[in-house]
Amino acid sequence: MNMPASVCIFSEELTYAVTNAIKFRGVEIVFLSAFWMLITGDPALYRIIGLSLYVSLTATLIAALVGLPLGALLALKEFRGRIAAVVFVNALMGMPPVVVGLAVFLLLSRSGPLGSLGILFTPRAMIIAQAILITPIIAALARQTLADLWVQYRDELAAMNVSTAGSVATLLWDGRFSLLTALLAGFGRACAEVGAVIVVGGNIDGFTRTMTTAIALETSKGDLPLAIGLGAVLLVIVIAINAIAWAIRRTGERLAGAA
Amino acid sequence: MRAPDSGLPLQFEHTRVEAGNRRILDIEALTIASGAPTAVVGPNGSGKTTLLRIGMGLLKPTAGRVTWGGRENAAATRRAFLFQRPVMLMRSAASNIDYALASADVPRAVRKRKISELLALVGLSDFEARPARHLSGGEQQRLALARALARDPELLLLDEPTASLDPAAAKAVEDILREVAGRGIKIVVTTHDLGTARRLAGDVVLLHRGRVIEHTLSGIFFTQPKTEEARRFQAGDLLI
């Protein structure tokens, strides 16, 4: 629904007046300014928030599709070198984001093996970098959760002649509420990450600027209200998603009889 | 109609299981044929559970042969196992049975009817939607029995099914086992409770230190035991 022109003009005038007031009063009221940007629906702010959520949620989804079955396989499949594989995946949890960003940059740069895709400095490149960064986190945490469940289920599933693929599916389904923690850890890391996305995304205004890269940029420019507004939103999003996930987990576990 | 790959008789020939220098099971010859339930009795650590696991195919012997219906690599499609402490999947009672039916390739169209039948058999019809892990110990044991029977087994192996149950719950399980045996399913049950063996079994296998000390008809075992170990075990003496 379009707002009447008079309301738009009034809103713009009010924003102008408040912003000027803030400038005159000094940095001690930057928090008020940040709050004002949030409640007035500042388009730049909300574009950044939207892109951040899109990139991080998509990366988490991709990482879950790879990391959860990988974690389940590491939990239940016995093979030579399994311990080394587990140690390796655990070690990858501590990968420096800028190193991941650099690796993806080299892959996607014009002279790189995937340069022909032409997706460097696009949200797709950022999704790839974040997915690579958080897949080991999800896989390692899922492995730990599912290994505990596998100790309970191993004999029963063997007695029912359940295949490896069937066992993986069973573990993932029955452990789904506990696995939310792994997914949250991955999403949290993706949301909070700045090094990788700034390397492969380029922090292009209106196109690849996320909350974290914008916070870094605006802080360096001295535009603290925007940086603080974004920081507050980031915190609220992370807390809200954790709260929702916790509620889902508690309710789900109670209904499934796991708690 | 029975599938062609029969699991009976279950035969152990020179079957040994060793862990390090310790011999856990050492069976020269043992044949478990169709018919009345077989009770495997013996003190703790005598090898009962190991024998049962090998009989299911969950454990490979260190040496010797185990055959089902004369075949060493017979598919375990007609065998089922009930653990001493069964683990319920984190689903409803009905879904636990549905899972077993699906893993036995039972068509989806007949599963609902089968679930109702099995829940009725074990007296849990009213608990269909209840999370399996919210059931009591005795109810979980009966649900696990229904889940094992979902595989339509010819051979049902039970590891101390009444060990952790109170008398009423144990009686409920024994009643179901009698009903199941009456349907032609061969039951092999381990127990250190001679009362259970006496009430259920047609023949008894006494194990001690991994060896078969005596295998005879239940009536003979309890009235005219052939070995000193069997006499002492029945008298409640410690077999060490």
Image (cartoon, helix red, strand yellow):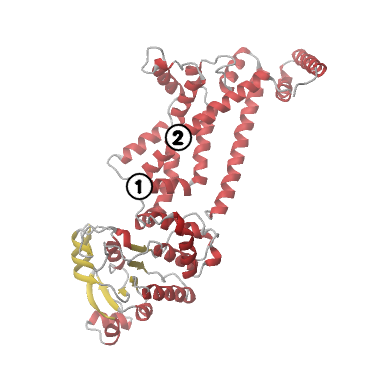
Q: In this view, does B110 lie to the left or right of B188?
A: right
Q: Which of marks 2 and 1 is nearer the N terminus?
A: 2
Q: Closer to the observer: label 2 or label 1?
A: 1
- Amino acid carrying label 2: it is Ile
The image position of residue A121, as x and y in percent, is 49, 16
Q: Residue at label 2?
A: A137
| Quadrant housing the C terminus of chain A | bottom right
Q: Numbered disc 1: what chain?
A: A
Checking the image for residue B234, the label placed there is none
Q: In this view, does A13 lie to the left or right of A160?
A: right
Q: Residue at label 1?
A: A164
> Which quarter of the picture shows residue A161?
bottom left
The correct choice, above or below, for A45 with respect to B201 in the image is: above
- Amino acid carrying label 1: it is Thr
| Quadrant housing the N terminus of chain A | top right
Q: Is residue A7 left or right of residue A56?
A: right
**Which residue reaches farthest bottom?**
B223
Q: Is there a contact, CB below 8 Å, between mark 2 and mark 1?
A: no
The image position of residue A147, as x and y in percent, is 40, 47
Q: Nearer the viewer, residue A63 or A98?
A: A63
